[in-house]
């Protein structure tokens, strides 16, 4: 995504080819899964470039629908659930006005990368959450999106059907128990911590 949003020419090339591909294969639309503009090696200015990209994509979709006399393609995006990432990665009100819906990736709030155990996808803050973890829950994520100007009818949340495992550091076994990395891989996932 970094290269694609980097110039007007790259965005135009991507948008044109994506629309042709979607119509050729009779898709209803596209879902953007960039984790995340302005983070994970993406420069801070990609936050603004993502907004520009989404606006240009919306304009192209609307024009393509007029030209083809077909229903407009759906444009959606996966978005972060973590408050600091939401604030760093998105111009919320602007993208909300352009996207048909946004799917909040409301899982992996806690995992083996944390020093203590926690629920993978909690609806609300737990009694053991403190510090940076107080906003690591679905309720806080949705509140952050709404406070930033997202349209409520465009927000979707995910409910994972998987869990995370922890290697415990002590005999404690509840939420907030000291942990030291991922538990051993199981027979189905064959992946530590999953």
Image (cartoon, rainbow, N blue to C red):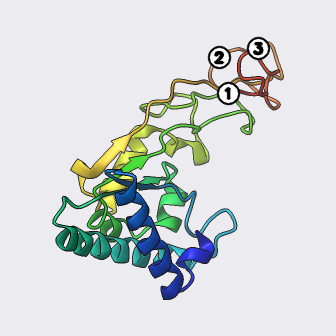
Badge 3 element: loop
Q: Is residue 68 left or right of residue 101?
A: left
Disc 2: which residue? 174
Of residues 186 and 24, which is closer to you in this image?
24
Number of numbered callouts drawn: 3
Earlier-in-chain disc, 3 versus 1: 1
Answer above or below: position of 168 versus 116: above
Answer above or below: position of 95 versus 191: below
Q: Could you tell me which quadrant the C terminus lies in?
A: top right
Disc 1: which residue? 117
Marks 3 and 1 sit apart, C-alpha to C-alpha, by 22 Å
Answer above or below: position of 11 versus 95: below
Badge 2 element: loop
Of residues 47 and 131, which is closer to you in this image?
47
Instruction: Check residue 98 in the rendering and tell me which mark sits there, or answer none.
Output: none
Question: Looking at the picture, how far across and down is residue 78, in whole percent?
Answer: 45, 52
Question: Looking at the picture, how far across and down is residue 145, in whole percent?
Answer: 36, 55
Disc 3: which residue? 187
Which residue is found at the position 82% from the left and 30% from the top? Answer: 180
């Amino acid at each position: 995504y970094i290269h694609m949003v980097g110039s007007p020419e790259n965005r135009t090339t991507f948008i044109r080819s994506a629309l042709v591909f979607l119509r050729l294969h009779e898709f209803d639309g596209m879902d953007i899964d960039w984790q995340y503009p302005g983070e994970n090696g993406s420069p801070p200015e990609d936050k603004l470039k993502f907004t520009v990209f989404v606006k240009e994509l919306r304009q192209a979709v609307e024009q393509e629908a007029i030209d083809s006399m077909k229903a407009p393609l759906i444009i959606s995006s996966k978005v972060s659930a973590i408050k600091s990432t939401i604030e760093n990665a998105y111009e919320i009100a602007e993208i909300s006005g352009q996207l048909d819906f946004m799917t909040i990736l409301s899982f992996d709030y806690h995992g083996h990368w944390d020093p203590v155990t926690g629920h993978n996808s909690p609806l609300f803050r737990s009694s053991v959450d403190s510090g940076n973890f107080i906003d690591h829950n679905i309720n806080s994520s949705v509140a952050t999106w709404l406070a930033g100007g997202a349209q409520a009818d465009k927000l979707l949340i995910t409910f994972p059907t998987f869990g995370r495992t922890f290697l415990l550091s002590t005999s404690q076994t509840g939420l907030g128990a000291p942990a030291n990395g991922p538990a051993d891989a199981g027979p189905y996932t064959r992946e530590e911590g999953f």
